[in-house]
Image (cartoon, helix red, strand yellow):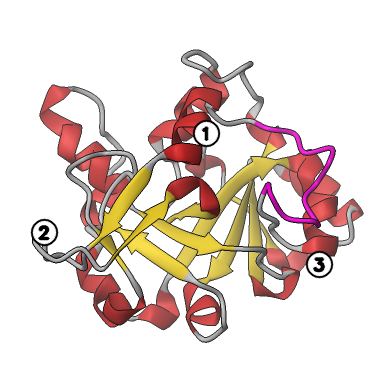
Amino acid sequence: MNLSQIKIYRILHIENIPHILENGITHKNSPSANSDFVGIGDVSLIDNRNTRRVHVDNGNTFNTIETITLGDFTPFYFGVKMPMLYVIQQGGNFVEKANKPEDIIYVACSIESIINSDLIYYFSDGHATDFLTTFYNKDRVDQLPLIVDWPSVKMPYWGGQENLDIKRKKQAEFLVQGDIPPDFIIGFGCYNDSAKQKLMEFGIDKELVKVIPNAYY
């Protein structure tokens, strides 16, 4: 696997898509942020990330290069059907309400286009709030295909105490600072044809929309 083959994914409520088509994927603190943003995430985790500072050390625990605050960045996953999606669909924890799968959209971006831009980015080898996770900057991006544990990212089963590290590595993240222009988006994933039709009504070319029910619970 090389960088040109890697996609990153962000899951969002379908009602946020028109704003994204016009403004891109905007950070919550951006002047272009969506004032009518429909949230689907765990509000306690979002609050935690707003103040959570992590060390970027490129795999050398004794040599912190810099420290960043997670909330300053927009997080993406390297795969689909993440543990957080389960909670978003089922409700519970600090997710305010369960969300129907047809209301949840995957927005896919090319990692290569971000790397070749002026955007600031970092990546991790696991869930960003886990103390076992290591963070990397652009100096190690060429090794990203080797650093991310792809079998864990693609693992369909992650429950149970015996799978805690698989669950952590499955949720490796790509963090991007600032707003991501709409032309960085390379596709949309949805649950069914009804959701696809709604995306097309927003003006998205049908060739950019993929129905992927197996990416949902």
SS at circle 2: loop
Q: Which of 24 and 57 lies nearest the eye of the viewer?
A: 57
Relative horizontal placement of residue 151, taking residue 212 as reference (left or right): left
Q: Which mark is residue 61?
A: 2
Q: Amino acid at mark 1?
A: Ile
Residue lying at 55% horizontally and 63% vertically, measured from the top left: 177
Percent coordinates x, y for residue 9 in the rendering: 52, 56
Does residue 154 appear anywhere in the picture? no
Q: Amino acid at mark 2?
A: Thr
Choose the circle earlier in sequence order: 3 or 1: 1
Q: Which mark is residue 205?
A: 3
Labels 2 & 3 near each other (Cβ < 8 A)? no
**Eyeballing the image, is 145 above or below 37?**
below
The residue to which callout 1 is attached is 46
Relative horizontal placement of residue 9, taking residue 136 as reference (left or right): right
Choose the circle earlier in sequence order: 1 or 2: 1
Residue located farthest toward the bottom when viewing the structure as drawn = 116
Q: Amino acid at mark 3?
A: Asp
**Eyeballing the image, is 123 above or below 76?**
below
- Residue neighbourhood size for the residue with mark 1, other residues' Cα within 10 Å, grouped as few (<14), some (14–19), many (≥20): some
Residue lying at 89% horizontally and 54% vertically, measured from the top left: 202
